[in-house]
Image (cartoon, helix red, strand yellow):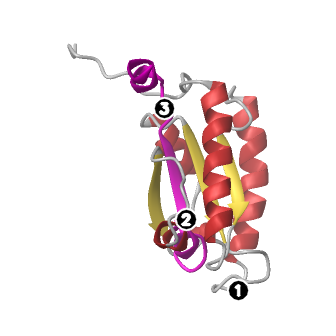
Amino acid sequence: MEKAKKNQWEPKIIAFLCNWCSYAGADLAGVSRYQYPPSIRIVRVPCSGRVSANMILDALRSGADGVLVSGCHPGDCHYISGNLYARRRFALLERFLEFIGIEPGRVNFSWVSASEGEQFAKVAQEVTERVRRLGPARKLVKEIDSCPA
């Protein structure tokens, strides 16, 4: 039973978290000992509005099975409207990803404030389950050639 659990595939998820809210929420989740999957790799960014489509595509191209972008709630951004830019950018990116064949649910967006440690743990669990159901990413992943020409 334990051996089967070790062989179970775990997705690699890159989480771009806003420094002021979502990163603090993740920190609170850890301090409060709320459990969330260890497959989440956190990248701290100044604001979710700074996360570009290129950063998300690079994460997928580099082998991430899923991406989570999380920022302050609308109206609570420390940079006035950065999270609103992120929301608009994400809506366009979702349509582009669908156009190029990336499954819906592989890239996720959420709002988590600094006081919502339990909410962050819940979002991390939901995203991990969603990506696990999709399986390993096959599109956009760079294949490393062991014998360059």
The nearer-to-camera label among 2 and 3 is: 3
Tell me if residue 37 comes above or below residue 62 in the rendering: below
Quickly name the residue at label 3. Answer: 10
Measured as percent of width and height from the top left, residue 100 is found at 69, 29
Question: The residue under label 3 is which amino acid type?
Answer: Glu
Question: The residue under label 2 is which amino acid type?
Answer: Leu
Tell me if residue 94 comes above or below residue 23 in the rendering: above
Determine whether, in the image, residue 145 is placed left or right of residue 47: left
Q: Quadrant of residue 118?
A: bottom right
Q: Is residue 90 magenta?
A: no
Measured as percent of width and height from the top left, residue 64 is found at 48, 38
Q: Is residue 25 magenta?
A: yes
Q: Report the magenta residues as a range.
A: 1-26
Alpha-carbon neighbours of circle 2 within 10 Å: few (<14), some, or many (≥20)?
many
Determine whether, in the image, residue 144 is placed left or right of residue 110: left
Which one is nearer the viewer's eye here, 36 or 105?
36
CA–CA distance in space, label 2 to label 1 = 17 Å
Quickly name the residue at label 2. Answer: 17
| Mark drawn on residue 80 | 1
Dot 2 and dot 3 residues touching (CB under 8 Å): no
Question: The residue under label 1 is which amino acid type?
Answer: Ile
Tell me if residue 149 comes above or below residue 20 in the rendering: above
